[in-house]
Image (spheres, rainbow, N blue to C red):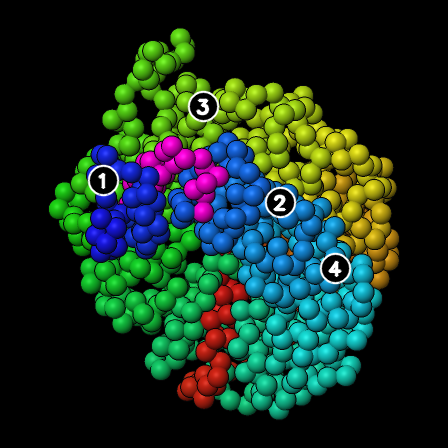
Amino acid sequence: MYFLLYRLGLLVCFYDDMEQMDSAVARALLHQMIKCNQLRGFQAEVQKLKSQLLNIAMQNQTLNDVLGSLSDAVVGLTSSQLESLSPEAVHNAIATLNQVSGWAKSQVMILSSKYLSYEKVLSFYNVSQMGALVTGVSTQSFYSMNPKELSQIIRGTTSQYLSDLSPAQRQGILRKIAAFGDFASSVKDIQGAFFKEIPLSDLWKQTEYNSSMMKEKELRRSQALYLYELLSKKNSPADLLSTGQLVKGVTCQLIESMGADFFLNNFKFFEKNLHLLSPYQVNCLAWKFWKVSNASIPPFLLLVLPTEYLEYVSGPLCVPFIEGLGKTEMDLLNPSLHKKSAVLQKVQECLNGSVSDEFDVDLLGNLICHLPPAFLHGRMSPKAMAAALPQFKLCHQLSHQQKTEIKYKLLELYGSPNNWTAETTLDVGPFIALLSKWELNVLAEKFPDIILQITKTIGPISSAEELLSTVFEFVSSGTSSVDSSLARPDCLGTRAPSSDEIIKLAEANVFWSVQELKCMDAGTFDKNVELLGTVSGFNSSQLIALKEKAKQVWGWLPGWKSYRVVSLGRVALALTEDEIEELDLCSVDTVSALSQQREWTLSQARSILQGFLEDSGQTISMLKSFDLVGLGAILCALNSTEIMSIRTAEFSAAVARIGLLFCSTPVLRQFKKMTESVFGAAAGWNGSVLQEIGTIAGGLNEDELKAFDKNLMPYFQPIAIRHIPPEIFQALSPEQIANLGPENAAAVTRSQREPLDTWQLRSLQRAQDGAWGSSPATDQGAGTTGEPLPTPALGGAPGLSGFGVVLCAVLALHLPF
């Protein structure tokens, strides 16, 4: 029998002969079913089969005895089952458990707690045995470790899992390492994304850096700005430009100061790392090249110059023009609308008004996402549409009109969905969401597994309501009412969600009625609560029903363990202030999970804050940096007195994370005052500080904002620009606004625009367009530098060499998506 099982290959994923199967055979099948993860579809059915085999595998045996032999089916165990495990059983099975993927956060928390309760002491060795389970170690446990062993952890094999740690966990590790021993040695140890967590104020404490240290590190822009300036005092620019992410710290002033020969000879380093540069840096590179190059003006510069210079893109310049533009993720940048229109018009001219085949599609690249609906309707051949479909699937923000035209092209290409094959349906993929209800029903009947597979990639209900509704109706149509002998009186005749249905439906679970959710079986809820907590479309009534189900299944709120609260996800939003007060919120990891939800009311957030302080026995002045990071958005509920009682050292370590919060203006103003205790008065802040503090810069008052040098304006983060109140934003001078840079100018909101005068609005337009110079008056009859523009040379091919990638990036600066 066992020999036959091994010969089944992927057919084991469809095994359905459960009659008279013994537990040993079930375990053997489960071991073979690891390979089922290779299948593109059918995962819901595979999970159902694994669940059935899991029940058989545990017959007449304790879970403690068979845990290590259940393969990756262990992810199907409920929280209650995992809670019943002994620490010794988890310890003995760790070699299996640490290789399993797909754990829910609550499961990881339970298993890591069990394992560590057996080990007693947290060390480098036992953490290295945990694999993916390391993410369940509490922040406080990490902080209590020996700093030398923590340094070993972030360098060792466990480091591959550290990116999955919460910001609070990472902060706890770094604070302990930084607080003891030689900081310079610690900096050498900290590699990859972990380095980004080091606060700017900590980097200031140590000056013995060298460029080779930076090669394996990811840097925030604030870190790069500081380190580049520091290292430039003893390293050549060429050495620094060749050192990974330090290029993020190259300022426009540094680019301007480079000699012509040096700039052109080292341009390859900018080109290689263009994805790391800000739109403002790319714009500076373009203008620098225009000034120092004797070659004909390359096409990318024509996009920096006034729109009328696009007329020089023709003939041999068309291909590099389109090709460079098509290699850019343009939808990540958002400058000027009129340039987008002009560029797209030029693209259509270069294509002779049509996209005829796969060669045109390859040339267009990402640009295909931005072709206007009318062009898609009349100018794209069916042959080109077939080639373009994979590229369309990668587009992030297609308009409704574009999607409509794509739908008609697909129907023209493939005919009625009645005649589609499984392969056609897979090829169309997420675009099935464009079909009518009738057409979707046809496909759901023919290819249910494929439709379910595609649905899981669609996302929130707002993007595919008809598809999700169809999937819900199809999956739930065979459900019978709950057995009257088992149902509560108020659930008689009401169908209830099954575990199998919940797994299949994913986001489509949003269509369960409140009554159906109320009638869910306790075991079904316990097994699937984490999945239900990820459904973004549940309304407040549905969330309340699920919260009440949690209270019914788990008992009184003070008895809920941390993993229970974490597993709720969005369902936690239904907790009232009184209910929040009943929860045990002593762990910063519990609060960190709650803070990931962005829809808390101010009173709810206040209750979470108070609950954490009371249950952990702390006051605001006692909080450590990892507490502040874990509280996240909950910090927006602090009052001014509380903010000013935060310890400066702890605030400075967490300020970059706090600078990501979208708090109210009064709160940002208090955070700004705290920031001055770290970095000095606002008048002395430089570019690295402005980058470090993020939204906190939105708390500057009118006089402080007016006092900033115009050259510092690009170093405000876009999220900070959006948080400056309109009545304060209008205090900026035209020169300051003109120097915002393309990205920050694009972040200006409609309410911020409204009070601006003519000169300020003109400056804002210049900034969006990537114009050079600070005085809008020089625009009249002159170039954007204040000097007359030269007439571009027509055979500009010599200027193309070595600038292909920059072409696309600079083009992107002028397309608002």
* Residue on which the image places disc 4: 147
Q: Are circles 4 and 2 on residues that touch, CB within 8 Å? A: no
* Residue on which the image places disc 2: 118
- Badge 2 or badge 3: first in the primary sequence: 2
2 vs 1, front mark: 2
Label 2 element class: helix
The percent coordinates of residue 666 (x first, y second) are 77, 39
- Which residues fall within the magenta stretch? 42-68
Q: Are circles 2 and 3 on residues that touch, CB within 8 Å? A: no
Report, in whole angstroms, how far the alpha carbon at label 1 lies from the one at label 4: 52 Å
Report, in whole angstroms, how far the alpha carbon at label 2 lies from the one at label 3: 31 Å
Label 4 element class: helix
- Badge 4 or badge 2: first in the primary sequence: 2
Three-letter amino acid code at the position of disc 1: Asp
* Residue on which the image places disc 1: 16
Q: Nearer the viewer, residue 423 or 316?
A: 423
- Badge 2 or badge 1: first in the primary sequence: 1
In this picture, residue 331 sits left or right of residue 410:
right
Three-letter amino acid code at the position of disc 3: Ala
- Badge 3 or badge 1: first in the primary sequence: 1
Report, in whole angstroms, how far the alpha carbon at label 3 lies from the one at label 4: 44 Å
